[in-house]
Amino acid sequence: MVTHSTAHVEPRERADFWSQQVDSRHTRLDFRYARRDGFRGELTSQRSDDYELIGWRSDRIEYVRTPGLVRQDPAPDYRFLFPVEGELTLRQDGQEARLAPGFGRLMTLDTPFELLHDSMLRGVILSIPARGIDGPLNRKAPLDAALDLTTGLGRVLHGMLLSLHAERNRLDAAQFNAVTDRVVELLCMVAAGDDRPDAADHLAQVEAAIRRYARDHATEPDLTGASMARALGWSLRQVQLALQRSGTTPRELIREERLRVVRDRLQRPEYTHMTISELACALGFSSASALSTAFRRRFGTSPRELRRRYQQA
């Protein structure tokens, strides 16, 4: 966890300091300050290889992502943001949307926008790899969604993110990743509209049970769609249909949960004695090469590279 504050910067240098901090965490933006001299801002950040969760407050400012910046510096990953105190105004495609506490926005930075807030707004923003949203939702085009965080799963999601940020000093990288994985799953459900009362039908209940089972039994090398179906008392066809709703299959779900277990073990010192080949065998992958290929596709790095980074940290 790191904290950056303009309180320790010379007043005339604070705007440049803030611009640098924001650019380094997101992408190239234009900044329009109400006043550059004496600008006040503070952010706290916890990050892993996949996610970054930032809480911030600052004076009045407008962040602008122009068409030129989108072309010059593409940024397909997602940001989920919401205010805790104060109000955000988002202008995009000729439309203006206001975000008050209790409402959030899931968006990419590959669409031009203007984001404005008044003095000393306090907000939270979560950076999510594009594959973390587009894969589970089976999307071919970026998603832009306004989300109600005052009721149902939206309220649970809101509470989890606030709690995750509050406990940032007590969580290591593996714990942070594990919780954020669950947050992103909820976020996908809310964005897809699966928090509607009429979505709680039989297939939705089956899907939730299958996901829990796959998570709890991912370390079993002989786990398959058929074995999950038998254990849960359903047919394989029911399992396939339930997962098809969210654009995945039993095989893909099992692989996803096993890759998360591998990522967790690569970060933990009690597993440093295990080679990549041993990890692959223990988690049901045919070889270290098969694991590395799937791991790089999912997390953008190889198992060895990830382990090396955590050993050097």
Image (tube, rainbow, N blue to C red):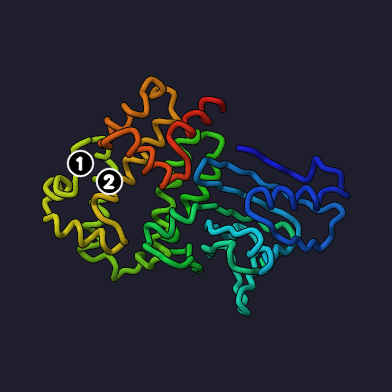
Q: Which mark is residue 223?
A: 1
Circle 1 residues within 10 Å: few <14, some 14–19, many ≥20? some
Give the quarter of the figure containing the N terminus: top right
Assess whether mark 1 and mark 2 are in contact (beta carbons under 8 angstroms): yes
Write down the residue under mark 2: 254
- 310 up-or-down from 168: above or below: above
Instruction: From the top left corner, tell me how far across and down residue 93 is, in percent.
Output: 60, 77
Q: Amino acid at mark 1?
A: Leu
Q: Tell me what residue is drawn at x 82 percent, y 42 percent.
A: 9
Q: Residue at (72%, 54%) from the top-left corner?
A: 58
Q: State the image coordinates of residue 119 (x, y, percent, origin top left).
A: 74, 60
Secondary structure of residue under mark 2 = helix
Where the C terminus falls, by quadrant? top right
Q: Residue at x 11, y 48 (%)?
A: 230
Most extreme residue toward the top, as rendered? 273
Give percent across and percent down for residue 29. 70, 59
